[in-house]
Amino acid sequence: MSETNYERHKRGEYSDPSPYPEVKVLRPNLRYVEILMDDYAGIVSEFSAISQYLYHHFLFSQIDKELGDLLKNVSIAEMLHMEILADTIINLGGNPVIRGSKSSLQGNFWSGKFIYYGTNLCDQLKSDIDAEYKAIEEYQKHIRCIEDFHVQAILQRIILDEKVHICLFSKALQKYCGSEYSGKTTDIR
């Protein structure tokens, strides 16, 4: 898929305005595939984020349309990340089945146990923010492990969207819960 098609799928205010880099790799590398499988469908992954945010969307839409729309649109932005990762995995010589790698006990398939269902709106919004911080932390760790500047650029660009999601979820937490997130797991600067 070309860069222009990725741009066409962007979610406006739910994504950073920077363009996505072209998906290409220096050469096939199955070790990099295994690293990216965790970002794709491991415990802390795009697939987990999509599933968690859609579940929260279903609940939040009953409370407030604007809040429900936020979760729906962020989950769609995460779907684009998953698509970009799938294309990268294929270019690296892998098969983007719905499984992780190390995080999911050596390649087990994805499980609904990987998402946080939560008990109330405020708890769920905090878990959504936490999921974004954890994703950034994982992407930063994987950037250091992967010595392919094309793949590093893709992960760096995805991180920009995750930062936007943290800001959006933090605003929602303030608006609907009157509180700020205090469980930050990593520095996103």
Image (cartoon, rainbow, N blue to C red):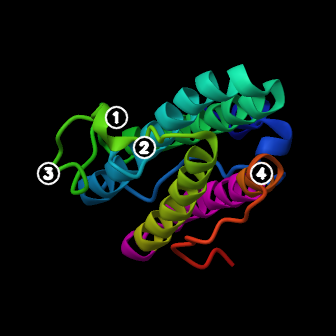
Indicate which disc, 2 or 1, sits on the residue closer to the N terminus.
Answer: 1
Which residue appears at 53% of the width and 68% of the height? Answer: 149
Q: Position of residue 55 (x, y in %)?
A: 52, 28
Instruction: Say whether marks 2 and 3 touch (CB < 8 Å).
Output: no
- Residue receiving disc 4: 168
Residue 115 in view in this figure: yes
Between label 1 and label 4, give the one nearer the viewer.
Answer: 4
- Point out the stretch of residues depicted in magenta: 144-167
Comparing labels 4 and 3, the label whose residue is closer to the camera:
4
User: Which x, y percent locates residue 77?
Assistant: 66, 38
Q: Callout 2, which amino acid?
A: Tyr
Mark 3 is on which residue type?
Answer: Gln
From the image, state whether disc 1 or disc 3 is nearer to you. 3
Front one among 87 and 79: 79
How crowded is the residue under tag 2: few (<14 C-alpha within 10 Å), some, or many (20+)?
some
Sequence-first disc among 4 and 2: 2
Identify the mark nearer the N-term, 4 or 3: 3
Q: For mark 2, what is the residue?
A: 116
What amino acid does circle 4 point to? Answer: Leu
**Which residue type does callout 1 highlight?**
Pro
Q: Quadrant of residue 132?
A: bottom right
Q: Quadrant of residue 53?
A: top right
- Whether 110 is among the magenta residues is no
Query: Mark 1 sits on what residue?
Result: 96
Along the viewing direction, whichever of 117 and 152 lies nearer the viewer: 117
